[in-house]
Amino acid sequence: MFASEIGIDLGTASVLVYVRGQGVVLSEPSVVAIEKHTKRRIAVGQEAREMIGKAPGHILAIRPMRDGVIADYATTEIMLKYFLKRVGVKTWPFIKNKVVVCIPSGVTEVEERAVKQAAYKAGAGDVVVVEEPYAAALGAGLDIMGPQGSLVVDIGGGTTDIAVLSLGGIVCKKSIRVGGDKMDEAIMRYIRAEHNLLIGERMAESIKIRIGSALPQGCPDSGEVDVKGRDLISGLPKVVSMNSRSAYKAIEEILDVIISGVRDVLERTPPELAVDILNKGVVLTGGGSLIHGLPERLSQETDLAVFLAEDPISCVARGTGKLLGR
């Protein structure tokens, strides 16, 4: 009587939790802060994210998910337990909660088993794993049960999953371990090379969100942002300005990898489904799809109509909710 049905988008950058009957009830960064020696939990989610790069030596701010898979099993278990407790899910031994967890489409059996095991340890009684592009397509409202093909590009923090779906399944797919985190790293490298300035992950992410662009001309209305970091020559704090065109140069290589992945899937798509995609276009989901001009850039490269899903960040979580009802 106390059992819950929960969908979890266990992402590299953030975790979203969907509870049946309530919708998406939690969206927090995938970060855990623990005490170095005792392994005691200090903070989880946004509070822990604020500690990245600022914590003293005895506190470790850990991102347990890397490239869409579990990099730190024990910390992932701590994080899941905390989030499930926070949304009011009872995890007593005799309660059999049903949990649907999303994983990238390219994971190995070992990586999939690690996700299942972490969910069981966190209090799940019945665990079902589903591939992210499948859940993303459901969350975006696409009809994937019919005979018409749909192409979904889900750009997350650690991976980009590209899939053609038809008749309730994935026909062809590709998972690239490139996403929003790689864009952040590319921005950090670019600023280091161009300005001899060392910046942190949070500053790089802020630049990506504010002025990141998939078009060479950048975002005309974005203006310039102040980039704050440590000068590598003097060792002192320093501020430089950066515009959207520079942000494009920084992430251009990452965008090319994603576009190349979409082309590869299109080349392997059966002709009948290719015609459907030509008529219906491509749907973008995931936080990485919010980069300015990405739909236009992808449309230019593929000669297809490209659409951004409604609320792309929560598409995967909402897709798990639709699977819970089955």
Image (tube, rainbow, N blue to C red):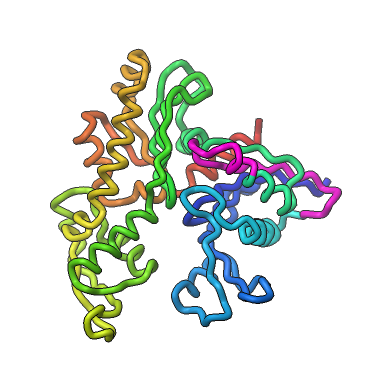
Residue visible at 60% across and 41% down in the picture:
110
Residue visible at 47% across and 72% down in the picture:
52
Relative to 197, does residue 45 appear above or below in the rendering?
above
Say how many tags the image has: 0
Q: Position of residue 185 (x, y in %)?
A: 34, 60
First to last magenta residue range: 91-113
Residue visible at 15% across and 50% down in the picture:
216
Name, please, the residue furthest toward the left.
Answer: 217
The quadrant the C terminus occupies is top right
Residue visible at 68% across and 75% down in the picture:
38
Whether residue 120 sits left or right of residue 286 in the image: it is right
Q: Position of residue 30 (x, y in %)?
A: 53, 59
Q: Is residue 182 magenta?
A: no
Q: Quadrant of residue 64?
A: bottom right
Q: Nearer the viewer, residue 139 or 151?
A: 151
Task: Decide if residue 310 is in sight here.
Answer: no
Q: Position of residue 278 (x, y in %)?
A: 29, 22
Relative to 279, does residue 126 appear above or below in the rendering?
below
Q: Nearer the viewer, residue 278 or 229?
A: 229
Whether residue 36 sits left or right of residue 142 in the image: it is right
Whether residue 134 sits left or right of residue 309 in the image: it is right
The quadrant the N terminus occupies is top right
Q: Is residue 104 magenta?
A: yes
